[in-house]
Amino acid sequence: MAIFHQVLDPVQSIAGDTLLALVPVIVLFVLLGVFRMSAWRAVIIGSVVTLILAITVWGAPVGATFSAYGIGAATGVWSIDWIVLWGAAIYNTMVVTGAFDDLKRWLLGQATADVRLQTLLMAWAFGALMEGLVGFGYPWAVVAPILIGLGVAELEALRVSALANNAPCSFGSLGAPLIGLATVTGLPLLALSRSVGEIVAILALFPPWVLIYLVSGKRGLRDGWPLALVASLSYIIGQLPTALFLGPYLPDIFGSLLCFAALLLLPRVWKPKTMLGFGGRELSPDEASAGAGAVVGARQAVRGLVPFILMVIIVTLWTGPWSSLTKWVPFEPEVHMISSLSHKAAKVSWEFSPLIAGTAILVCCLLVVAFLRPNGAQLRTVFATIGRQMWGAFLVGPIIFGLADVFNFSGMANSMAFGFSKTGTVFAVLAAIIGWIGVALCGSNTTTNAIFGGFQVSVATILGAPPLLFPSLNSVGAEVGKAIASQTASVGVSTSKYVRQEGTVIRNNLPGSLTYLLIVVAIGCLYYFVFPSAMRP
């Protein structure tokens, strides 16, 4: 069979080629953003549109096109769903056995009554832990009720939970967004983990200051700035080396655990001059001495911490650069083509690795079950809950990666990239904005990376930009857009009175999300114009 040669300009017009290549993206945006269609239905329709355009306009061979779709779907199941399933199983096992509540009570029991420390401990550190394990808006849903119980106004608690959750999203769900990004771009996973980690490390300097301001105003920052400094630096010190040397699976876990330790130890050596409640109100001596929560014994604390300690040990040993477990690839189905940009051989492939990171999480899950000892009824509840809450996400994974592989195989991504490359260096600004818009509509960093990852790399190739920069900005731009994503918000408000009032919450979150986006754009320009070598594999 003759190898497929991609066509860069099927309608002989840069504007026409670009607009036609954008049709699947526009269809998804309209279905999700205008018609509020569920994501799994929207991506099915988007897949049909992509297949039709790939075959009829770009001339991709039918058999190879459907093979590319199947390869993408297999990638979505094995590389994404397999990790998310067992991460969610660990979380829900902790919930049904009470270990998760034990952990929350223990953390609050160690803190002071000051709303600034409580907010950083729960929204920033605990939210990062939740994002790193589960993602999908769960940090909102879990953290917001805790803050409300501590006296934070409900709408503000939702905003604080959402904006605290922005920095860790690229490493959420045990690295699923970056695993997906590496799959559709062909870039090394560890290199992408490094580049995103370096961007996020700068971004993470800002949220703790914003959070303190939101719950206590300027007065809270006046003598509480050491809290923000310790919260940001401790998270970065844990997150960045993990992203640089171990990959995308554990940066949030390490960052959050180190942040917990730093914030819990800080009051032993330093405390703000005044203890503040929500809104910057000074607490009375009785309120200040009341503590932050119930006393929880060492046994309960251990039950809450051991699952995360097990995960850190096993995933580090299993997936670190010293391990060859994930490198075993019994077979690798692939479809070949000649790139319309480089005119060199390229391929769409799926490396089937039985001992992939998701299998390491499965082993962690089995050990957590052995440690927490849920009964049969509780285990049935665990998987019933996962099925009820996440079946749509499990469907979206394989469908969207099938769509992405057809988009890349047919040459549509290259045609769209060629059109966008005419913006020149302005694209250094657009890269993050595209990710922000994408996640605002689809609600998933992983999905946004799948749709735009290959396109971002193609633009970088045409412009001669550092190959890691644009896809990394796509991912980080997407993470700061999560605060205004309707699908994420629907999960985040599920434990509040704002159920089915996501619009109110999104409007309240928008200024903060835009502020973070401007910071990401500035970081992108810094790497593009000043430190481009940092964004090369």
Image (cartoon, grey):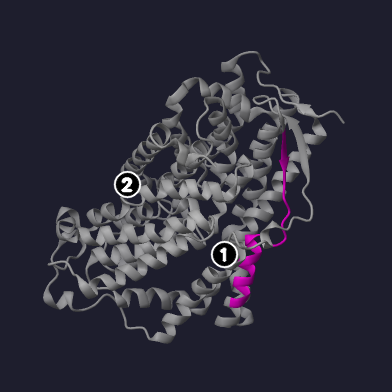
Q: Secondary structure at mark 2?
A: helix
- Residue kind at label 2, given as amino acid type: Asn
Label annotation for residue 359: none
Task: List the residue tagged with mark 2.
Answer: 508
Residue at the spot 29% in from the left edge and 56% down from the top edge: 208
Image-based side of 180 in relation to 207, left or right? right
Residue 382 in view in this figure: yes
Which residues are drawn in magenta? 346-367
Q: Residue 173, how many percent across, how many down?
A: 53, 58
Q: State the image quarter where residue 477 is shown.
A: top left
Image height of 248 relative to 339, above or below = below
Image height of 198 relative to 322, above or below = above
Q: Residue 53, how many percent across, how many down?
A: 69, 27
Q: Which sits in the foreground, 270 or 441?
A: 270
Q: Which sits in the foreground, 207 or 330?
A: 330
Label annotation for residue 87: 1
Q: Residue 37, how many percent across, how many down?
A: 56, 42
- Residue kind at label 1, given as amino acid type: Gly
Residue at the spot 32% in from the left edge and 51% down from the top edge: 205
Magenta span includes 343: no
Q: Earlier in the sequence, mark 1 or mark 2?
A: 1
